[in-house]
Amino acid sequence: MTSTTQASPDTRWLDDRQQALWRSFLGGSTVFFDQLDRDLRREHDLSMPEYEILVRLSEAPDHTLRMAEVANQVAHSRSRITHTVARLERAGLVERRSCASDGRGVNALLTDEGMEKLREAAHTHVGGVRRYLLDNATDEEFEVVGRVFERIRTSLEGARF
């Protein structure tokens, strides 16, 4: 949409430079995440969302989290998390168990097989992050990206779902 498009008079349109940078961000982030996903699928039969769930469980006390907390940490809907965890469970990487402190709650638990799969996949993932992102940015540029997205995450936290 350009500034000549009819819309609210309060709309702060992007100038040409901002529009070009925005489109570079959209295109670059799309191909970056798609490539990380392809690498994980090809090498380890894991998707990026599955990998991220395994990471979060590996970092949790006793390698277990309530399903609602998994959804919150990876910023996905509970429905999407339920389907993704079900795939991981069928693969033997995660188990679902009733929450001991609340019979209505369900926990996801990283299995030993899931931890081993994560250890293997982490090399591919980190290698991709380094090759596709860090090798294309200076330390200072990467620092700025991190600060900007931390501000975005903080300002939008709680606005999800």
Image (cartoon, rainbow, N blue to C red):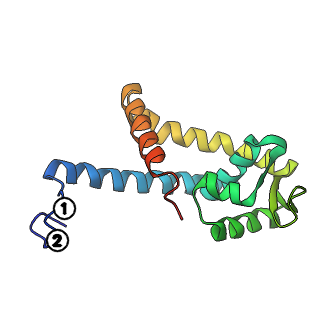
User: Amino acid under label 1?
Assistant: Thr
For the question of whether residue 46 can be seen, the reply is no
Total tally of numbered discs in the picture: 2
- Residue 16 appears in the figure: yes
Residue 126 placement: quadrant: top right
For the view shown, which residue lies furthest in the left direction? 4
Please state which of residues 122 and 110 is positioned toward the viewer in this rendering.
110
Picture residue at 63% right of the left edge, 43% below the top: 124
**Residue found farthest to the bottom:** 6
Q: Which mark is residue 7?
A: 2
Residue tagged 1: 11
Picture coordinates of residue 156 (x, y %)?
45, 52
Q: Amino acid at mark 2?
A: Ala
**Position of residue 2 in the picture relative to residue 65 (left or right):** left
For the N terminus, the image quarter is bottom left
Nearer the observer, 99 or 20: 99
Q: Give residue 149's position: percent from left, percent from top.
A: 43, 42
User: Label 1: few (<14), some or many (≥20) within 10 Å?
Assistant: few
At mark 2, the secondary structure is: loop
